[in-house]
Image (cartoon, grey):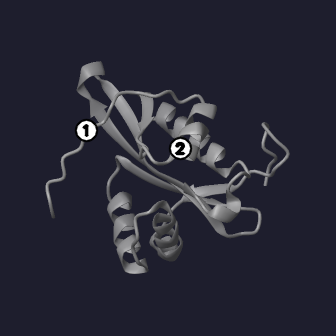
């Protein structure tokens, strides 16, 4: 592991998720507030793997355990006539929070977005997640537009 240039903590090892990571992904999504089991997580990982506009990156901490994930969606954005990268999920285990893993996952997302030619990177965060909002601001993300959602029921 290499040292984080912004602090003394070692960087996590980052890699693309595979179906073999289903148990860890299920646990992380549940931590984020989106419960699922290993089988559901395996199906979600397969959906991402099969879509060349999606990426799921896992972080493994110095203890060898999966400690975080970030999911990315690359989409064409008509108003700017360019690609936008949307972070659809970012979570770090409670035990690993404060160790720089979230910051490292954001840097990886930004690196991948630039490599894909994206003009910007965006995310949404529930209004109740005030700690996450501070984290994003501390990492140079600014408040954007208001998001409106209408749920359409089961797909």
Residue at which label 2 appears? 130
Front-most of 61 and 153? 153
Answer yes or no: is residue 117 visible.
no
Would you call the spot at circle 1 few (<14 residues within 10 Å), some (14-19), or many (20 or more)?
A: few
Q: Position of residue 154 (x, y in %)?
A: 15, 64
- Where is residue 58, by image quadrant? bottom right
The furthest residue to the right: 8
Residues at badges 1 and 2 in contact (C-beta under 8 Å)?
Answer: no
Q: Is residue 89 above or below residue 133?
A: below
Q: Is any atom of residue 78 visible in this view? A: yes
First in residue order: circle 1 vs circle 2: 2
> Which of 44/114 is in front?
44
Q: Nearer the viewer, mark 1 or mark 2?
A: 2
x, y (%) of residue 151? 19, 52
Left or right: where 23 falls relative to 53: right
The span from disc 1 to disc 2 (Cα, nearest Å) is 19 Å
Q: Position of residue 88 (x, y in %)?
A: 40, 48
In the drawing, does residue 129 fall left or right of residue 153? right
User: Tag 2, which secondary structure?
Assistant: helix
56 and 125: which is toward the camera:
125
Per the image, label 1 sits on a secondary structure element best described as: loop
Q: Which of the 4 quarters of the picture holds residue 91? A: bottom right
Residue found at x 76% / y 68% = 63
The residue pinned by badge 1 equals 148
């Amino acid at each position: 592991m290499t040292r984080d240039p912004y602090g003394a903590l070692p960087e996590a090892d980052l890699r693309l998720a595979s179906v073999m990571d289903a148990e860890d992904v299920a646990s992380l999504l549940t931590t984020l507030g989106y419960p699922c089991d290993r089988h559901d997580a395996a199906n979600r990982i397969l959906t991402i793997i099969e879509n060349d506009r999606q990426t799921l990156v896992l972080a493994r901490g110095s203890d060898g355990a999966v400690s975080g994930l970030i999911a990315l969606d690359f989409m064409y954005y008509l108003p700017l006539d360019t690609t936008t990268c949307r972070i659809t999920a970012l979570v770090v285990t409670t035990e690993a929070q404060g160790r720089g893993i979230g910051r490292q996952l954001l840097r990886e997302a930004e690196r991948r977005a630039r490599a894909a030619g994206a003009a910007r990177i965006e995310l949404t965060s529930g209004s109740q997640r005030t700690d996450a909002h501070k984290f994003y601001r501390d990492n140079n993300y600014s408040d954007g537009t208001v998001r409106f959602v209408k749920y359409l029921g089961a797909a």
